Every structure is written in structure tokens, then in C-alpha cells.
């Protein structure tokens, strides 16, 4: 490969661009009209427009992405995560168009994307699963009988998709039918597939996932685990590697199960096998994410591996050359805090807008992967992530202390962020002691106890916001001057608009 097109935006696009440059590859960006001057566009060697701001008219349109790849004469396409990264039809289209797909085979994506098919495969591969149905159920009465047989509480879950969509916890029979209908409706609207299945709901679970990497030569290994139990709306906000609760023998057992899961679908490239773990450390297969994960930097920090570089190596046909048990070890501890433009005091409601101030922390063991810079805007059209703050320490306690320090140093103005919540979690006894579950937010988070920022900083930020607004030129002039500044800062070889 000489040239890679990144079919994504934001911090993951910047992350892949950096890995490409370090391997001597030309990086090609794509952008919607809302992202014409975005950070990932400026970091790329070339950039191509793919449509209007709405993702459904730009980043999610197969032909627009493929047209950009053809125009740039790219050799390969990296999907990042989100958007088209787990779309088997797109992966097939990429391969059929003659490009290298930097990801797993379409067949593996398809098998693991259908949760009922995945459960059948995992059962055959002897990967532990929570009691439940192997096949999807459409009839509420039949599903209710199954739920009664399993025993409440149960989980009604979409057969396709993920991210907490099409999922309902049901605690008693009276609420089952309504919950199932809502899950089916949400699954249909989110994934175009209303099928659901029923499984036993694990109470007070921990969400622990294993990073998988596999080459084309039959070598599959895990790269240890990540703890992802601090979540809001069933989506992760704080992750760490390794988990604080797994003894070495349980880590080895879960890692072996994760490898079996990957091998069962003929997996290649990077992926993640996710488990729910109960209070007795019994674990159950939940799903496999057939892509790179948002939280991959925590694994990089404790293993020393560059996972995107590993993806590129595998796509070029290289052998892994290592095994987790024999060749790798866990060095220290890493904690990742996702910095979203969201208001934790308002049930994490998104708060996009201009990023008037963005001064990330730094220092030993501190990494910030950002997709937006000061003076830019967190757009309304996409996920409101600003950055990921990842802190390493020689121990879990040291990593948490470093995270506290870095979060306190992180200066953002113009939008409300999840930084106060992350500071709250770092100082909470449940998190520090390691005694928490996926219900941390519901059980421990009190918005009224959020740490307030320094009053002087708040005043300075307010003044900066007023000055920023006052300095804005009329739209046409601002657009013209913005384009001029972009050309000065960019290293594009070419920029084409549709």
C-alpha cells in the first residue's frame, strides 16, 4: 500500500492519518460540507468532498466514498469506527472496487453483526453465554414464555446493531410486551431490522472486553482486556486497561475464549470481543465489535503496540510475529476519559457549539487524541466527542491520580463537557476501590456534586466568548478568509469539491 483513504472524520481520522504518515503512507481525507476546514482535513495529504453535512448524505454514502478513493488513486480504505466500519456490504463494495479493506472479511462482519447468528456460533465454539434464545423472536407471547422460563430480570436486545439501541431491561412479566415492542421499534428505526432476542439479564455486571488481532496466516491473539463499565445511556465514557478485578487465571481463561470467538468467524485484523462479568467473575459473551474501538489507546499505553499500525501491517499481509501469553505483558495501567460536548447535569444532553478555548493537558504519561481545535466548532451533525484523554501510570492508583491532575488542567470554554463528570468519577470511592458496575451513573452520580470550575477562569471564558462573537466577520468574508487560512496551513496535494 502507498496511499490510504480514511472513510471517517474527527479524532479517529486524525489518529489513522498519523499512523499512515509514520509508515510512510499518503493519507487521504474525506469531508462533508460541515467539515471542510476540520482538523482531519488539514492533517491529510489530500482531501475530497463527499456531500452535505448530514452523514446520511455524505459519510454513509458508499459511492461518494468510493468515488473519492478512485479520484485520489488510493490503494486502501480504512473505515475508522462508527459510520461504515461494521457495514459488510460496504466492505464487499470496497473489495469489489479493487481497494484493500483495512478491516475484517465482510463475512466475519456479517456473522458477528447479527447477534442471533453470533450466539449460535459462540455456542458452537464453547464461548460462555448468558441463558437465552439463540434465534430471534417476533411473537411477544412466545418471547414472554421464554422470558418466564429464563427467569426475570431479562434483556430484550436487537439482533442487529449495537451501542445500546434496541435494548430493554425487563424486571417483571407485566412490563414485558411493552418493552419488547419498544425494543423492536427502536431496532427497526436504528438498524432497519426489528428482530430481537431474549437473554438473562446479569445484575450488577461489569463490561470487560478483550482486544483481538489476527493476521491472514492463521495467527490470532488477544492483547489483554479493557474495563468499560463507566457508561451513560449504555455507552462508554471512562475506560481502563487492565481491569482491576481479573486475576491472571481469569484473564487467561477469558482471553482464550475471545480468541476462540474470533477464530470461529475466520477473523482478520483488529476487533474486540465483549463480555459481561458478574460478581462471581463468571463471564458471558455479549457481542463482537468488528472494528477498532474508541478506547484502543488504553491497550496501546499498557502494551506499547500501535494498534492502527498493526491494522496496516495485517492489511499488507504481514504476520503478527507475537502472542499475548508468550511475547507481551501488561505494563502499568491506563485510564481513558472521553471528553464530549455534553452536559452531565442535564442527563448528558449534547451541547455542540464553538470551541472558544481548548487547551489540553500534557506532561509525563498524558495523551490527548483530539478531533477539534480551539476556534473550531463541535458540529451538531455528528457525535459530540471533542477528544480522548488517556493517562498512564505504573499502577492503577497512579493512573487515576494522573487523570485527576490532567482533568484539572484541561481548559475548555464555549461548550459544556463531560470533564466535571470524569473528575467526579476519579474521586469517587466506588471507582477508586474498583467496586462498581455498569450502573455507576445511576447508583453513584449526583449532578449537584459536580466540581465547579475556578470562578476567575469562568469569568475569563465568558469574556473570551464575547470577544470571539464580536470578532466574527460577515459570512462571505469569513468564509473567504477562512479558506485562505486553510490553504496556508494545509499540506494538501489536491482538494476537489463535487
Image: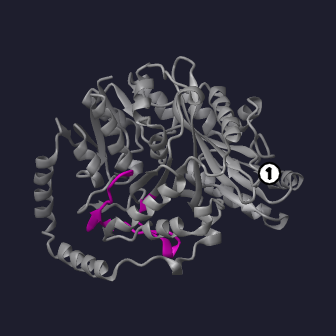
Left or right of 305 in this view: 184: right
Q: Residue at x 53, y 51 (%)?
A: 240
425 in the magenta segment: no
Q: Percent x, y for residue 497? A: 22, 43
Magenta span of residues: 338-367
Residue 234 location, quadrant: bottom right
Q: Determine whether the residue tagged by mark 1 lies in a helix, strand or loop.
A: loop
Q: Quadrant of the C terminus?
A: top left
Which of the pair 414/99 is nearer the observer? 414
State whether residue 167 appears in this view.
Answer: yes
Task: Name the residue that disc number 1 marks.
Answer: 139
Residue 273 location, quadrant: top right
Which of the pair 92/155 is nearer the observer? 155
Left or right of 304 in this view: 443: right
Which of the pair 357/350 is nearer the observer? 357
User: Is 321 situated above or below 110?
Assistant: above
Q: How is the image coloured?
A: one colour
Q: Percent x, y for residue 6? A: 35, 38
Left or right of 51 in this view: 175: right
Q: Residue at x 26, y 52 (%)?
A: 38
Q: Percent x, y for residue 491? A: 16, 40
Amino acid at each position: 500500500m502507498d496511499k490510504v483513504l480514511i472513510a471517517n472524520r474527527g479524532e479517529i481520522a486524525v489518529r489513522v492519518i498519523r499512523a499512515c504518515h509514520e509508515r510512510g503512507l499518503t493519507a487521504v481525507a474525506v469531508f462533508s460540507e460541515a467539515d471542510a476546514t476540520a482538523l482531519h482535513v488539514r492533517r491529510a495529504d489530500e482531501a475530497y468532498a463527499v456531500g452535505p453535512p448530514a452523514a446520511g448524505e455524505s459519510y454513509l454514502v458508499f459511492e461518494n466514498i468510493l468515488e473519492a478513493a478512485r479520484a485520489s488513486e488510493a490503494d486502501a480504505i480504512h473505515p475508522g469506527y462508527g459510520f461504515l466500519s461494521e457495514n459488510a456490504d460496504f466492505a464487499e463494495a470496497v473489495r469489489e472496487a479493487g481497494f484493500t479493506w483495512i478491516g475484517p472479511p465482510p463475512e466475519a462482519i456479517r456473522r458477528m453483526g447479527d447477534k442471533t447468528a453470533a450466539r449460535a456460533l459462540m455456542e458452537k465454539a464453547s464461548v460462555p453465554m448468558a441463558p437465552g434464545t439463540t434465534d430471534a423472536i417476533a411473537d411477544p407471547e412466545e418471547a414472554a414464555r421464554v422470558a418466564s422460563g429464563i427467569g426475570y430480570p431479562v434483556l430484550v436486545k436487537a439482533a442487529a446493531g449495537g451501542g445500546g439501541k434496541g435494548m430493554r431491561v425487563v424486571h417483571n412479566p407485566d412490563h414485558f410486551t411493552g418493552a419488547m415492542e419498544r425494543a423492536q421499534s427502536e431496532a427497526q428505526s436504528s438498524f432497519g431490522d426489528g428482530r430481537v432476542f431474549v437473554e438473562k439479564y446479569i445484575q450488577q455486571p461489569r463490561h470487560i472486553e478483550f482486544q483481538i488481532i489476527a493476521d491472514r496466516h492463521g495467527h490470532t491473539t488477544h492483547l489483554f482486556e479493557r474495563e468499560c463499565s463507566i457508561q451513560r445511556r449504555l455507552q462508554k465514557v471512562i475506560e481502563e486497561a487492565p481491569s482491576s478485578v481479573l486475576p491472571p487465571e481469569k484473564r487467561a481463561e477469558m482471553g482464550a475464549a475471545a480468541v476462540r470467538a474470533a477464530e470461529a468467524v475466520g477473523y482478520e485484523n483488529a476487533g474486540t470481543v465483549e463480555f459481561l462479568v458478574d460478581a462471581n467473575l463468571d463471564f458471558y459473551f455479549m457481542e463482537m465489535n468488528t472494528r477498532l474501538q474508541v478506547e484502543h489507546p488504553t491497550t496501546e499505553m499498557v502494551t506499547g503496540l500501535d494498534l492502527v499500525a498493526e491494522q496496516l501491517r495485517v492489511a499488507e499481509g504481514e504476520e503478527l510475529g507475537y502472542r499475548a501469553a508468550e511475547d507481551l505483558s501488561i505494563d502499568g495501567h491506563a485510564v481513558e476519559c472521553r471528553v464530549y460536548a455534553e452536559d452531565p447535569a442535564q442527563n448528558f444532553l449534547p451541547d455542540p457549539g464553538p470551541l472558544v478555548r481548548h487547551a489540553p493537558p500534557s506532561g509525563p504519561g498524558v495523551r490527548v487524541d483530539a478531533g477539534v481545535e480551539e476556534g473550531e466548532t463541535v458540529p451538531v451533525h455528528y457525535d459530540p466527542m471533542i477528544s480522548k484523554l488517556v493517562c498512564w501510570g505504573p499502577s492503577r492508583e497512579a493512573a487515576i491520580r494522573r487523570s485527576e491532575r490532567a482533568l484539572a488542567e484541561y481548559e475548555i470554554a464555549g461548550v459544556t463537557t463531560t470533564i466535571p463528570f470524569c473528575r467526579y468519577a476519579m474521586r469517587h470511592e466506588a471507582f477508586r476501590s474498583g467496586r462498581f458496575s455498569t450502573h455507576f451513573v445511576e447508583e453513584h452520580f449526583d449532578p449537584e456534586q459536580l466540581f465547579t470550575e475556578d470562578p476567575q477562569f469562568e469569568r475569563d471564558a465568558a469574556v473570551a466568548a464575547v470577544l470571539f462573537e464580536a470578532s466574527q466577520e460577515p459570512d462571505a468574508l469569513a468564509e473567504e478568509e477562512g479558506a485562505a487560512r486553510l490553504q496556508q496551513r494545509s499540506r494538501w496535494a489536491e482538494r476537489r469539491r463535487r
